[in-house]
Image (cartoon, rainbow, N blue to C red):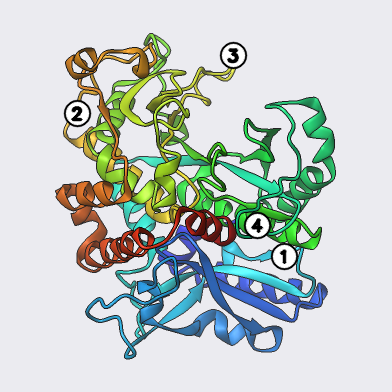
């Protein structure tokens, strides 16, 4: 990705900077003999889709974009368009690329890609564009002087081949953090780190994870929009490299019966003028009043949030107690069963590393919707000074129901259906989603719920392992 603030480029009408940026992209396309440039967006299922323009006509399409039938944003995970008013055979929007998101695709010779905003034919922001939703949330927080910085922490399962019915052949069965696991996956992991780094996406941490074939690679935290973009690229480059090596990588929440799920925890902090406003060295957890209120907002809206952060039927096979998935609406220091973990700060970097982790999230979520919703919820907590109550320094599973009730600790929704119902009851979240998406998103998810009721369990696991 090109190191230029995408928000500034698009909202300040900085024509000179944009022209230089476009010229740089054209030069890269010519120098690297790129034939196809993919214009990509992420749909409401968290799936990256797109069309491609040839290098010859790239420059004019950078401005005009590429046409897209509106109904594509009404498709469910089975790729079936849902009967939502305004989403039928009539109507078109444009995929207009953000030039700051340009990357080469190391696994696909002759190809590059950019991430797009969906706009109407007059160029105005469209109410069903997920990337625009995050931009609006960022702007709303910016009015209070806050900038969200974030990092996704995705887990994926590396397989020897594409999953087939009743069969998932994992790449390795090493132990969690096992040195042998590092050696077995070394070629894949090192190549992926290099591929991401070459596109301006810095990897900070990597390790073999708990489950068979499971690995985790974390990108360095960044401003929210850039963090969401980087997550999209990470998934695409991970899966692309696996295909190139005749392997298969899946980020599905639960890939096969009996397998531990793949999470995608989100780390969050708010900044103002280069200062981490979540940090307070004199507090017992190192958190400021702003941070506590932000946590209060996350917990108050947590039942609705998981409809957007755990966005699939398959998600709720993972979002369960005792799986360290954050199935309880509470928070605590290094508490991995709580929805919000307060990580220990790094010695010598206390202020910079003060953050909170929202655990109930996975890769079926659209990262722009997920981050935007988390920011909306946290900012609501700040505006209303929501008290998160006392932090929990115990495993909520070990508490009696009476004790959990006394501490106001709720278990999060256990199905996508109950999560969607919670979302529709949440006025703050529904208002933030806007009049179009607040109808469209639940309709898509309810169609998935209905269809999976009629499918056997094996079909569900296979579909998600293949899609994600």
Along the polypeptide, which appears first: circle 1 or circle 4? Answer: 1
Q: Mark 3 to mark 2: distance in Å?
A: 30 Å
Q: Between tags 4 and 2, which lies in front?
A: 4
Q: Mark 3 to mark 1: distance in Å?
A: 37 Å
Residue under label 1, please give it.
Answer: 105
Residue under label 3, please give it.
Answer: 347
Along the polypeptide, which appears first: circle 3 or circle 4? Answer: 4
Q: Most extreme residue toward the bottom, as rendered?
A: 90
Q: Mark 4 to mark 2: distance in Å?
A: 45 Å
Q: Is residue 12 visible?
A: no
Q: Would you place residue 278 above or below residue 124 in this image?
A: above
Along the polypeptide, which appears first: circle 3 or circle 2? Answer: 3
Classify residue 17 by image quadrant.
bottom right
Along the polypeptide, which appears first: circle 2 or circle 1? Answer: 1
Q: Between tags 3 and 1, which lies in front?
A: 1
Q: Of the numbered discs in the image, which one, if any, rests on residue 163?
A: 4
């Amino acid at each position: 990705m090109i190191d230029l603030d995408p928000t500034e480029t698009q909202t300040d009408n900085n024509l000179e900077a944009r022209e230089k940026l476009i010229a740089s992209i054209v030069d890269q396309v010519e120098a690297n003999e790129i034939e196809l440039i993919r214009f990509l967006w992420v749909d409401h299922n968290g799936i990256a889709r797109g069309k491609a323009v040839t290098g010859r006509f790239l420059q004019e399409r950078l401005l005009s974009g590429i046409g897209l039938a509106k109904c594509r944003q009404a498709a469910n995970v089975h790729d079936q368009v849902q009967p939502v008013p305004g989403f039928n055979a009539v109507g078109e929007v444009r995929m207009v690329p953000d030039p700051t998101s340009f990357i080469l695709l190391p696994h696909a010779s002759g190809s590059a890609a950019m991430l797009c905003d969906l706009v109407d034919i007059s160029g105005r922001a469209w109410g069903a564009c997920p990337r625009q939703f995050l931009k609006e949330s960022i702007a709303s927080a910016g009015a209070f002087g806050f900038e969200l910085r974030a990092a996704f922490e995705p887990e994926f399962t590396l397989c020897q081949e594409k999953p087939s019915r009743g069969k998932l052949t994992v790449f390795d069965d090493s132990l969690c953090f096992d040195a042998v696991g590092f050696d077995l996956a070394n070629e894949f992991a090192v190549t992926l780190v290099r591929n991401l780094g070459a596109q301006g996406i810095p990897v900070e941490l990597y390790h073999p994870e708990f489950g068979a074939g499971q690995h985790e690679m974390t990108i360095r935290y960044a401003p929210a929009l850039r963090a969401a973009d980087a997550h999209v690229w990470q998934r695409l480059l991970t899966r692309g490299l696996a295909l190139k090596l005749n392997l298969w990588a899946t980020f599905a929440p639960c890939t096969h019966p009996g397998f531990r799920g793949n999470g995608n925890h989100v780390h969050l902090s708010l900044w103002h003028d280069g200062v981490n406003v979540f940090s307070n060295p004199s507090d017992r957890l190192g958190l400021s009043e702003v941070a506590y209120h932000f946590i209060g907002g996350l917990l108050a809206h947590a039942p609705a949030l998981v409809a957007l952060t755990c966005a699939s039927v398959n998600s709720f096979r993972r979002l369960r107690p005792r799986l360290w998935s954050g199935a309880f609406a509470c928070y605590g220091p290094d508490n991995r069963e709580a929805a919000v973990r307060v990580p220990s700060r790094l010695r010598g970097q206390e202020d910079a590393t003060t953050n909170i982790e929202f655990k109930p999230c996975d890769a079926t979520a659209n990262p722009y919707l997920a981050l935007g919703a988390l920011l909306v919820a946290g900012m609501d907590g700040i505006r209303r000074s929501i008290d998160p109550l006392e932090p929990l320094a115990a495993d909520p599973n070990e508490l009696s129901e009476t004790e959990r009730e006394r501490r106001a600790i709720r278990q999060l929704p256990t199905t996508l259906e109950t999560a969607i119902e919670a979302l529709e009851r949440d006025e703050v979240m529904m208002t933030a989603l806007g009049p179009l998406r607040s109808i469209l998103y639940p309709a898509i998810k309810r169609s998935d719920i209905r269809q999976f009721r009629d499918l056997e369990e094996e079909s569900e696991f296979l579909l998600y392992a293949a899609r994600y």
